[in-house]
DNA sequence: AAAAGATTGTTAAAAATTTCACTATGCCCC
DNA sequence: GGGGCATAGTGAAATTTTTAACAATCTTTT
């Protein structure tokens, strides 16, 4: 079957593919060699058809009557997502969260190399964190280009997010992951994702409230 | 119109309501008193009908011909989400990320009070961070009940997440926000949310790859 | 006080996504 | 090598979610 390259791929599919990769890696560590859509579905908490459908957007990776080879499927998904290469990223805002990111190894392990760390606080500039020197954010456009940054990670306070984004846009950034709790304005050709952990707390609080309300009725 | 309390409310609606609150707070700071669904939609990046529909799940908050009163709408949404009260939360895993959360004021400002910080590392136990003493995670069930924790935040490494969750479940926790990149098993009456920032990086990488591929064709 | 203008709440239509059901295909055992 | 079993891939159906359209109603103007 030809790969459906021209079909629009649901956002939800991409986020599930990331979950599949995660679970496949777990299985790999446990020495599992082959897995069925049924089994993978259970461990990802989704419907088996959903998995098969999601994969069908990119090709055929399974063996009928058998299942999927864990390692191969993981590699195939990663390749489909564009993760069979490394990506240069920059962190803008070296506060509590920015530091946590710089110190955390998981990014590099996943192929996202932090090549720049920027802050506007003179006390932070020059400091070394996770093997990187903090650079003045006035040098953002220049350095972003120089370091060949493709993705920017915003960890400034909310009210500074747009300014930081503007600097990145100036340098022709292609994608942004925004941790600041503020919507940002970007041209349509820039991929933006929001990591909004407060929203998840809201959601949990709501669901608890709701299930308690239901219990009372 | 009666509130549609018995209708199932889409997950996506809840997450948008959180965005509305965010933007309404921004408008409030700028002194905006009244806003139309049209204007709010622009600043949230959604469709105006979507906003009116989302709000309709909970009641009527607007004034035809006028719009919504910013402060009142914000309060009404927060009340609908169960945020018109405080929630006791506990952080499990006081590493880079756990520390960032403990030091960050935004949680408290939103009504989520961190009442407990747990870690299994003997070198961390007893340390004071953000005004809280780090407690040994073996005391989790006991302390969780004692402190009346309702929501647990998991910031342990992925392979420890399930263990931490089990402790929380033992204590009858109602909701969990999991930052560790691992799916966790919980009974259906526990609300679980995943904050998976790597997924957002994956998504950005994919969208960049895709738009570049499109450009080449 | 009526008419015009604006904008909500709501119903209907459209679009997107998920799930189901079935067909095709591969492996294993006899 | 053929039959039975398992499971991927896929087209259709069901469901959910989003968008559009419009009647209801509030404010402002004349
Ligand atoms: N701390 C957390 O656990 C956490 C969790 C989720 C989201 N967030 C969000 O992430 C953001 C950062 O949180 P934090 O706790 O690290 O805050 P922080 O105040 O510790 O750090 C913010 C940093 O951004 C820098 N900064 C400000 N304006 C800048 C600019 N224009 N260019 C470059 N750097 C600039 C500041 O100097 C500071 O170092 C906030 O928006 C916060 O809401 C934080
Ligand atoms: N650092 C980041 O920026 C970042 C961002 C997103 C997600 N994460 C995820 O968050 C988690 C924590 O990241 P981190 O950088 O803080 O790691 P870390 O190694 O700095 O901290 C983990 C902490 O958990 C503690 N711990 C381990 N097992 C425990 C248990 N059973 N009970 C209680 N505490 C336990 C450890 O002692 C350690 O203090 C990881 O799963 C990571 O993938 C981190």
Image (cartoon, coloured by chain):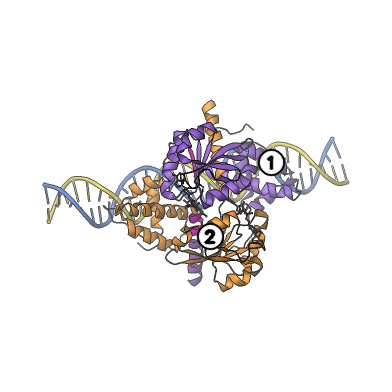
Chain colours: A purple, B orange, C yellow, D blue
Percent position of residue D21, x then y = 33, 44
Looking at the rendered structure, the number of numbered marks drawn on it comes to 2
Instruction: Please tell me the numbered disc located at residue A73.
Output: 1
Task: Count residues near mark 1 (Cα–Cα under 10 Å), then give few for <14, some for 14-19, many for 20+.
Answer: many
In the rendered structure, does residue B9 fall within the stretch colored magenta? no
Let me know if residue A44 appears in the view.
yes
Q: Which mark is residue A154?
A: none
- x, y percent for residue A50: 60, 46
**Magenta residues (range):** A188-203
Asked if B91 appears above or below B47 in the picture, the reply is below
Dot 1: chain letter: A
Label 1: which secondary element: helix
- The residue pinned by badge 2 equals B102
Tell me the quarter of the image containing the N terminus of chain A.
top right
Coordinates of residue C18 in the picture (x, y in percent): 56, 49
- Residue drawn at (72%, 42%) of the image: A71
Q: Quadrant of residue B202?
A: top right
Q: For the residue labelled by badge 2, is the local secondary structure a helix, a strand or a loop? A: helix
The span from disc 2 to disc 1 (Cα, nearest Å) is 39 Å
Q: Nearer the viewer, residue B167 or B61?
A: B167
Within 8 Å of ligand 2, the CB of disc 1? Answer: no
């Amino acid at each position: 079957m030809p790969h459906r390259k021209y079909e629009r791929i649901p956002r939800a599919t991409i986020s599930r593919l990331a979950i599949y990769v995660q679970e496949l890696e777990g299985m790999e560590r446990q020495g599992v060699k082959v897995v069925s859509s049924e089994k993978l579905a259970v461990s990802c908490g989704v419907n088996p058809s959903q998995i098969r459908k999601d994969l069908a957007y990119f090709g055929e990776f399974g063996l009928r009557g058998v299942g999927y080879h864990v390692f191969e499927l993981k590699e195939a998904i990663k390749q489909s997502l564009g993760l069979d290469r490394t990506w240069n990223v920059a962190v803008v805002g070296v506060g509590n969260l920015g530091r946590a990111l710089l110190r955390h190894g998981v990014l590099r392990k996943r192929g996202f190399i932090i090549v720049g760390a920027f802050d506007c606080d003179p006390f932070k500039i020059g400091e070394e964190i996770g093997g990187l020197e903090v650079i003045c954010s006035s040098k953002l456009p220049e350095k972003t280009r120089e370091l060949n940054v493709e993705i920017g990670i915003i960890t400034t306070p909310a009210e500074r997010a747009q300014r930081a984004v503007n600097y990145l846009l100036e340098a022709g950034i292609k994608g942004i992951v925004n941790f600041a709790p503020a919507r940002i304005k970007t041209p349509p050709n820039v991929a933006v994702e929001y990591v909004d952990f407060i929203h998840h707390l809201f959601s949990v609080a709501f669901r608890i409230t709701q299930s308690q309300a239901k219990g009372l009725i």
